[in-house]
Image (cartoon, rainbow, N blue to C red):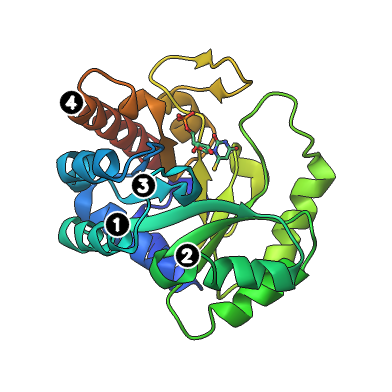
Amino acid sequence: MERVILPYEKRIDFATNLVARQLFNIMATKKTNLCLSADLTMTTGILDLLEKVGEHICMVKTHIDIIDDFRDDFVVRLKQLADRFNFLILEDRKYADIGHTVSLQYSKGLYKIGEWADCVTVHSLPGEGILKALNGSMNCITKGVFLLAEMSSEGNLITQQYKQETVSMASKYANIITGFVCQNKDTFQNPGLIQLTPGVQLECSKDDFGQIYKTPEKVVVENGADVIVVGRGITAAKNPEVQAVAYKDALWKCYIKRISG
Ligand code: S5P
């Protein structure tokens, strides 16, 4: 059956990655497919925002390397919030190096991402070695990878062939692949994988650096997004909490419309 018309709870059994199972479960239980991109540069800003919107999201997406006052206790508190409100943590590291380097970037250094992130974003550009290395680092732990198959930004260099080869590369590493970061429903068919789509605001627009925004209706109903990433649409709002609820409601309504045919 076509992936986009199956409800999240029916897709759980197709998932080969444990994080994908968890995420389908959280979305079905909390009735939200909103992922907050918490692109703020101070830890208190991120933690305060999550206190307010944690109940409305299925996942938070972080860029740990943009934080000015990073300390180890930040990730402890982030984890506590994730447990309390039942959401997952995606570190948007966009790994893009040779496998050996990526395995070090994943487990070592200041951030030790592998210790706290449920899943990470990864480019397929360097080839299969990047997944082989992460597969080794994630061995036996409930962790996941969102592989970038498309991007939201104007003029990006990803071609149709690159996209198709990215999707077939993933099939060999089914146990660690949570899904794809992409814009279109024809990117992949497997109902056990999750389509993560960024570049979303309530009205179509652009930013000054080539980011292209589409509406919830467009990305969910037409383009098949399962988890929808919203950053500045919420973080830059006068009242982020009110805006998070507005996005959650709009996105969930679109999902219900899609699965109702
Ligand atoms: O193609 C992409 C992939 C990603 S992960 N386009 C994106 O914008 N992103 C990320 O989504 C980007 O790094 C940023 O953290 C977020 C979008 O933020 P917004 O403020 O534009 O909604």
| Cβ of mark 4 under 8 A from ligand 1 | no
Quickly name the residue at label 1: 74
Which residue shows up at 48% across the image and 40% down it? 225
Quickly name the residue at label 2: 113
Which residue shows up at 25% across the image and 31% down it? 244
Separation of marks 3 and 1 at Cα, in angstroms: 9 Å
> Disc 2 residue type?
Ile
Quickly name the residue at label 3: 69
Quickly name the residue at label 4: 242
Lateral position of residue 243 relative to residue 152, left or right: left
Determine contact: label 3, label 4, CB under 8 Å. no
Q: Residues within 10 Å of mark 4 (few under 14, many from 20)?
A: some
| Residue 191 in view in this figure | no
Separation of marks 3 and 4 at Cα, in angstroms: 27 Å
Determine contact: label 2, label 3, CB under 8 Å. no
Observer-nearest of 216 and 261? 216
Determine contact: label 4, label 1, CB under 8 Å. no
Q: Quadrant of the C terminus?
A: top left
Lateral position of residue 227 relative to residue 206, left or right: left
